[in-house]
Image (spheres, rainbow, N blue to C red):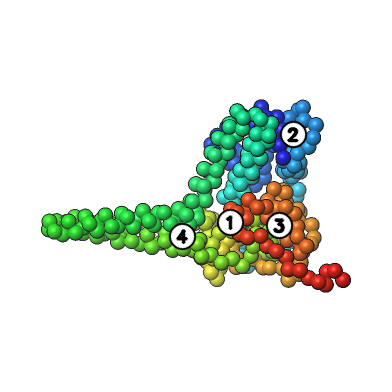
Amino acid sequence: MVQSQSLSTLTICGSVQVYRNRLNSVKASGFISDRCASCQFLRRSPSSSSSSSLGRLWKSLKQRNLLKVEARWPFQESDQGLDPSSERSESANEDILIFFFQLDLATRVQYALNLEQYDVAQQLREKLNEVEEEAIKLQEGKRGSSSKSEAQDKGISIIRLRADLQNAIDSEDYGLAAKLRDQISKLEAESLAVSAKALAFENAEYAFRLGQKLRHKTFGYRAVVCGMDPICCESSSWMEAAEIKKLPRGSNQPFYQVLVDVRTHPDLLVAYVPEDNLLALEKPDKERFDHPYISFLFYGADTAGDFIPIQQLREKYNKPRHEVPFDSQDDD
């Protein structure tokens, strides 16, 4: 992946804050532009003679951005007046890009080690650590790991407040006791909420899997699953705009990060779709699916037409590899 890169340029790409600043350009346009995060990683060295997979990916992304293909959805809007862009998710797109940065930097670290350029490898490793820390923070902001630890912290606080409450009662300081009781009640309610969220992440059941091709129930577009959450982890304003409350299960259902075929809607790219709005295909879909993220999230397509997620993506969501059932009729 990195053979076409100049190692001297790999150490000047800045900190996580630079990544985040450049990600804002992605949020503004929905595409990856020259100012996007990792653009310095993807530029080829002038002395390079071979073309890397990342270089081809960058060229593809850049061409898509410059062409600005004008296309309309061949599907009618919903009765509520929503359109496919209502489920566009900037945070889902950012999550995927940060995952890409991790893959990219890890490969560059290994390449530098292979060349015995240990100083360069160390600098890249430090940048990789920064990106991994940022990724953990983003995940903990919405997933059960932070909720579980937060619930434990609140439980400890409640125990301490109850001890203070007993002391206040023993000393007949009833005004303080009343305030402590209010604090305990508030913390108990908060602890219950975060515990429920943590439990949802631990015991989540999903109808769809990574790499599976689906169709949107309302808008009809084809999509591929590349991420999932047991409940909606978007902002309240996003949920309001997408009218999530009108769904049968509301926000308390699995939500999926999906890649949308850019041939039908080049401006959508990544959507965050509730399980209620997705349909499994009745027959295998082996038709072409065009999206710039496919090349680094999946190995390729299986015999049923679905995509095979790379190992790192499966590990991110703790999912086993899906094996396509053997059909003896295929040999006939």
Q: Disc 2 and disc 3: Cα gap in Å?
A: 26 Å
Mark 3 secondary-structure assignment: strand
Give the residue type that dot 4 points to: Ala
Give the residue type that dot 2 points to: Ser
Query: To which residue does mark 2 refer?
Result: 4
Give the residue type that dot 3 points to: Ile
Mark 2 secondary-structure assignment: loop
Residue 38 screen position, x and y as percent:
64, 38
Labels 2 and 3 touching (C-beta < 8 A): no
Query: To which residue does mark 3 refer?
Result: 308
Q: Which residue occupies the foreground of this view, 235 or 47?
A: 47
Give the residue type that dot 1 points to: Tyr
Query: To which residue does mark 1 refer?
Result: 317
Q: Is residue 90 visible?
A: no
Labels 4 and 1 touching (C-beta < 8 A): no
Q: In which quarter of the image is the N terminus?
A: top right
> Hey, which residue is sitting farthest right in the picture?
332
Where is 249 relative to 168, above or below? below
Residue pictured at 75% horizontal, 39% vertical: 52
Q: Disc 1 and disc 2: Cα gap in Å?
A: 31 Å
Q: Quadrant of the C terminus?
A: bottom right
